[in-house]
Amino acid sequence: MRSPVKPAFSGSIVTRTWATDGTAAPELRMEYLTSPEIAAAIESGMRTAILPLGAVEQHGPHLPLAMDALHADELAVRVARRLGNALVLPTVRVGYSPHHLGFAGSLSLRSTTLEAICQDFLRPLAGYGMERAIIFSAHIGNYPIMREFEQRLKQDLAPLSVVLFTDGESIIDTWRRCTDDLTGLRARVGGHADIAETAVLLALHPDQVRSDAFERGYTGFVDSELLERAFSHGIHSVSSNGILGDPHGATAGLGFECMEAVTSLIVEHSNSRGAEIAESGSRAFDVTHVANSGDAGRPMTDKGGNRYE
């Protein structure tokens, strides 16, 4: 999967065009589909929704505030394509980031607001015929809050089955492993605006990376104790420039490796909690058979030629 650009609509075909090689794949992001297309996809077996969470917060002098939201956009589509039976909800772009408010421009939701947004995004889905939702975050700071509201969300949204991926430390560990394998620079992974996160944006939106503004940040070992200190006292308490790690040495190749590995983490977690394609089989949905809003009631076929009424 490559860097996404504006969705392309060609006749009855809804596709997603990739900037690096010009190839196209079926659009999975619900906000770019019509209501009849979504209804047809659900009817064909695509009954899982992915809800990505991001953040709008400082990422040092070299990355834009939208870093986590842009990362979440991409990971969500990768997860959906890997699962094969999922559509992607719009990214919740602002997250829980009070520990970044000491830096100009950073925004933050209250924990109760983030929980309410997740509830509101997911509440209608069961009524549309969806059976499960998967929530993950590209912003590590959302995970403690997600763990707090996980059980309430599951209870309140039943019968929708809700799976939350909340292991932020495993993401940092995965970045370390990928960085070590490709560059030997694992010590530059700190989890925020570091070599790995910078590499991700070089892969997705290289024009958004200010390569002439790279600065080394806090380069001690980042563990749960240090993250707790940053969450409690602000990230400026451990890093004056807001960076945990060091961006030097980042490459687009490393970014793609990190995204692929984190996608696997989320998919494996989801599969272990019942989000895999049901044994009865959710057939691959081909949106080419829904030409317009007037066609939603027409018989459809999947890519194998099987007919649906």
Image: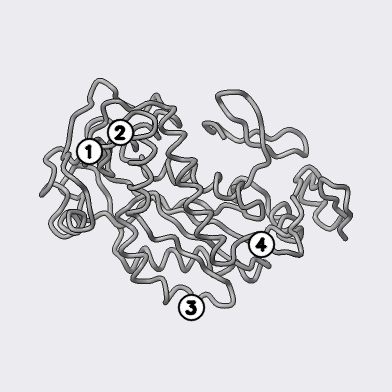
Which of the 4 image quadrants contains residue 226? bottom left
- Of badges 2 and 3, the one in the foreground is 2
Residue 128 x/y as whole percent: 66, 66
Q: CA distance from mark 3 to mark 4?
A: 19 Å
Read off the residue under disc 3. 156
- Of badges 4 and 1, the one in the foreground is 1
Q: Residue at 52%, 56% (x, y): give it.
A: 268
159 or 164, nearer to the observer: 164
Amino acid type of disc 2?
Ile
Read off the residue under disc 2. 195
Question: What numbered label is drawn on residue 47?
Answer: 4
Determine the secondary structure under disc 2: helix
Note whether 26 is above or below 36 in the view shown.
above
Amino acid type of disc 4?
Arg
Looking at marks 3 and 4 on the same chain, the residue that comes earlier in the sequence is marked by 4
Read off the residue under disc 1. 245
Residue 308 x/y as whole percent: 86, 58
Amino acid type of disc 3?
Asp
Residue 74 x/y as whole percent: 49, 42
Q: CA distance from mark 1 to mark 3?
A: 39 Å
207 or 219, nearer to the observer: 219
Asked if marks 3 and 4 touch (Cβ < 8 Å), the reply is no
Asked if marks 1 and 2 touch (Cβ < 8 Å), the reply is yes
In the picture, measured across the screen, residue 73 lies left or right of residue 108, that is right
Q: Residue at 50%, 63% (x, y): give it.
A: 121
Q: CA distance from mark 1 to mark 2?
A: 7 Å
